[in-house]
């Protein structure tokens, strides 16, 4: 039996999307699981600017502790997902809608497509790229997302695969040059992000 929540209700009761405002304990476990099975569909609320569809996404990341020659090191890992057509692995992204902030949209898309939640940080920048499906230009904004929770069930679990990989591997397999550029910006912030990772205990 499927679980069903209206779009408006789901957008109002999803504290797992916005951990800065709502702690994860705000929702009962049953309701949290139910919300995680709901995904937005349609483009009737999609934002455009001068004909460009506005797209937002995240590079979900964490730190993995490794031991080399008795020395403990933290390595940056990023989460990639399979595309809907099965061609390549990429970072979660999707349309920015009129009833949400850019950060909320980025967090929502990451939950829907990758099944992780966390802290959305300062923007990595914006890029323009041509849609492969339509004759339209997209304007994409990317954010780092320090992952605090990985869900077992999420809206697109049945149509996507997800993998934690190294930065080097991500740059090899991601088919989008603009996403690779965003990843370079994230890596360039490494000293800053390492400190935040230590403080927030983001390894798991």
Image (cartoon, rainbow, N blue to C red):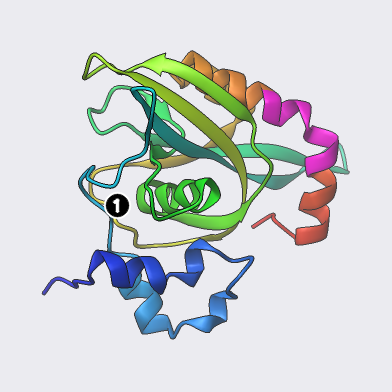
**Residue at which label 1 appears:** 157
Left or right: where 3 falls relative to 101: left
Range shown magenta: 185-193
Residue depicted at 52% across the width and 20% down the height = 127
Specify whether residue 25 is painted magenta: no
- Residue drawn at the location 50% of the way across and 51% of the way down: 101
As rendered, which of 165 and 28 lies closer to the eye?
28
| Residue 175 x %, y % | 42, 17
Front position in the image: 35 or 151: 35
Q: Position of residue 150 (x, y in %)?
A: 50, 59
In the picture, the quarter occupied by the C terminus is: bottom right
Quadrant of the image occupied by residue 25: bottom right
Task: Answer above or below: position of 118 versus 138.
Answer: below
Tell me the crowding category of disc 1: few under 14, some 14 to 19, or many 20 or more residues within 10 angstroms, Cα based.
some
Residue lying at 23% horizontally and 72% vertically, measured from the top left: 5
Please state, as top left, top right, bottom left or bottom right, where the N terminus lies in the image: bottom left
Task: Name the residue at 52% across, 18% down.
Answer: 178
């Amino acid at each position: 039996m499927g679980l069903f929540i209206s779009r408006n209700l789901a957008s109002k009761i999803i504290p797992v999307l916005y951990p800065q405002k709502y702690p994860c304990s705000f929702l009962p476990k049953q309701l949290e699981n139910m919300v995680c099975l709901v995904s937005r569909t349609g483009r009737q609320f999609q934002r455009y600017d001068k004909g460009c569809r506005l797209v937002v996404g995240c590079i979900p990341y964490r730190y993995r502790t490794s031991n080399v020659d008795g020395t403990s090191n933290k390595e940056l890992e990023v989460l990639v997902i399979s595309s809907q057509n099965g061609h390549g692995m990429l970072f979660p992204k999707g349309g920015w809608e009129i009833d949400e902030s850019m950060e909320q949209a980025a967090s929502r898309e990451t939950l829907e497509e990758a099944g992780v939640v966390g802290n959305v940080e300062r923007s990595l920048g914006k890029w323009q790229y041509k849609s492969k499906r339509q004759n339209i230009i997209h304007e994409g904004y990317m954010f780092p997302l320090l992952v605090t929770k990985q869900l077992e069930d999420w809206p697109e679990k049945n149509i996507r695969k997800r993998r934690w990989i190294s930065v080097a591997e991500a740059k090899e397999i991601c088919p989008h040059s603009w996403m690779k550029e965003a990843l370079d910006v994230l890596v360039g912030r490494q000293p800053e992000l390492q400190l935040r990772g230590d403080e927030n205990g983001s390894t798991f």
